[in-house]
Image (cartoon, rainbow, N blue to C red):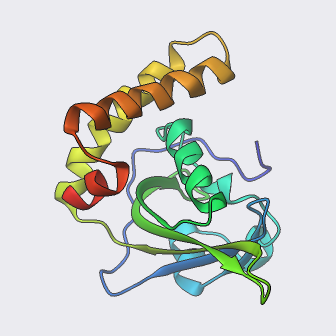
Amino acid sequence: MTKYAAVPTNAERTFGEEEIIVSKTNLKGHITYANDVFLSVGQYTEDELLGQPHSILRHPDMPRSVFKLLWDKIQDKKEIFAYVKNMAKSGDFYWVFAHVTPSYDNAGEITGFHSNRRCPRPDAIAKIAPIYELVLGHEQKQSDPKSGLAAGCETIAAFLEDQCMSYDEFVFSL
């Protein structure tokens, strides 16, 4: 847990449809750049965020298995789109529609990651939130974090199989 971890509140923060939250991280997910929108919505200063793991924003309502899916995709040199519930420094929450991509050097090696986050549509959040709640429940029923992560991943895979969709198809169907 980071030194800035807050107790979650039920207060929602929002940002404008025309605003984009931008951040960059190194290979380990530590923040190397945060734009003004990111700082404002997250209620952090640049000095507080730079060098911190991006997980500083992780809301406890977010299943770990969603982040495993995200990391697996970007480390495989693929982009991913995902709905994410984040937590501001105050404990307030905010939803984003994230687009995360690897950043490359001239030799084609991954040097870090870049994320643009937009304000999500409320109807998409209404559809994804109960699914995340279900996945998180399966994670939390397990006796240890490793088993919880595996159970969450299995739940996501089973859900997608039932939908006859890939993760990408599902996200864009919302």
Most foreground residue, 63 or 86: 63
Instruction: Name the residue: 79% across, 59% down.
Output: 28
In the image, taking residue 19 as reference, residue 169 lies left or right, namely: left
* Left/right of residue 50 with respect to residue 145 in the rendered view: right
Q: Is residue 133 above or below residue 119?
A: above
Q: Quadrant of residue 15?
A: bottom left
Q: Is residue 123 above or below residue 148?
A: below
Q: Residue furthest left?
A: 123
Q: Is residue 174 visible?
A: no
- Extreme residue in the top direction: 143
Task: Name the residue: 34% across, 71% down.
Answer: 119
Classify 56 as above or below 150: below
Q: Is residue 117 visible?
A: yes
Quick one: which residue is furthest to the front in this view? 107
Whole-percent x and y of residue 71? 62, 53
**Residue located 37% across and 37% down the image:** 132
| Total numbered badges shown on the rendered structure | 0
* Coordinates of residue 90 in the picture (x, y in percent): 58, 56
Front-most of residues 71 and 125: 71
Image position of 2 (left or right of 160): right
Counting from the top left corner in percent of width and height, residue 130 is at 28, 35
Residue 43 occupies which quadrant of the picture?
bottom right
Where is the N terminus found, in terms of image quarters? top right
Residue found at x 68% / y 54%: 56
- Quarter of the figure that contains the C terminus: bottom left
Is 46 or 67 nearer to us in this picture? Answer: 67
